[in-house]
């Protein structure tokens, strides 16, 4: 039990650190704080969904899950950063046109 608590606290620390760094990268790449906050919200929802599935499946939080959760942020941020950056740098003017 103390090992699992240690893994959970390490994963939470990794998640928070990664989210802060991802927010800074998003802010630099989009030059828009609102877009960066929305993107971090999307990444947070992805992370909560994965952690909820791990919990619902009854898996114990071990080494693999702890590392996997922190790596998942990298994949989620990569996807979201490309979408946000393309949206912000689109030559089209209206939000509707940018989303097509």
Image (cartoon, rainbow, N blue to C red):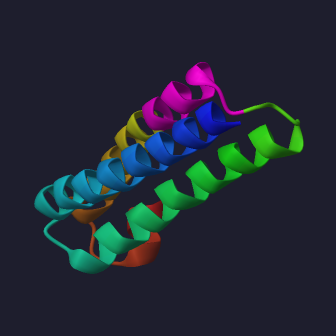
Q: Which residues are magenta?
A: 61-72
Instruction: Report the residue that reaches farthest toward the front.
Output: 2
Q: Which residue sits at x=64%, y=35%?
A: 4
Residue furthest right in the image: 57
Quarter of the image holding residue 58?
top right
Residue 86 makes an appearance in the image: no
Rendered residue at 40%/63% (across/down): 39
Q: Is residue 45 magenta?
A: no
Q: How many numbered discs, if any?
A: 0
Instruction: Specify whether 70 is left or right of 86.
Output: right
- Quadrant housing residue 92: bottom left
Assign the magenta stretch its main secondary structure.
helix
Asked if residue 76 lies left or right of residue 59, the reply is: left
Image coordinates for residue 60, horizontal then vertical, percent: 76, 31
Rendered view: 17 above or below 66: below
Could you tell me residue 56's position as x and y percent? 87, 45
Where is 79 relative to 43, above or below? above
Residue 26 screen position, x and y as percent = 23, 57
Is residue 19 at all visible to an observer of this figure?
Answer: yes
Q: Position of residue 61 (x, y in %)?
A: 68, 33
In the image, 5 versus 71, the foreground residue is: 5
Instruction: Give whichever of 75, 10 is nearer the camera.
Output: 10
Residue shown at 38%/56% (left/top)? 16
Q: In the rendered image, which quarter contains the N terminus?
A: top right
Query: From the viewer's perspective, is 51 left or right of 27?
Result: right
At 59% from the left and 51% from the top, the residue drawn is 46
Q: Residue furthest top?
A: 64
Look at the picture and state if 46 lies above or below 60. Answer: below
Specify whether 5 is left or right of 9: right
Please tell me whether residue 67 belongs to the stretch shown in magenta.
yes
Instruction: Between residue 60 and residue 85, name the one nearer to us.
Output: 60
């Amino acid at each position: 039990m103390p090992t699992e608590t240690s893994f959970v606290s390490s994963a939470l620390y990794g998640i928070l650190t990664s989210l802060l760094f991802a927010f800074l990268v998003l802010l630099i790449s989009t030059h828009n704080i609102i877009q960066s906050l929305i993107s971090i919200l999307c990444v947070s929802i992805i992370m909560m969904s994965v952690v909820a599935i791990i919990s619902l499946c009854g898996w114990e939080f071990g080494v693999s899950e702890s590392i996997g959760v922190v790596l998942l942020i990298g994949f989620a941020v990569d996807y979201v950063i490309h979408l946000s950056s393309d949206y912000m740098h689109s030559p089209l003017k209206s939000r509707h046109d940018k989303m097509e």
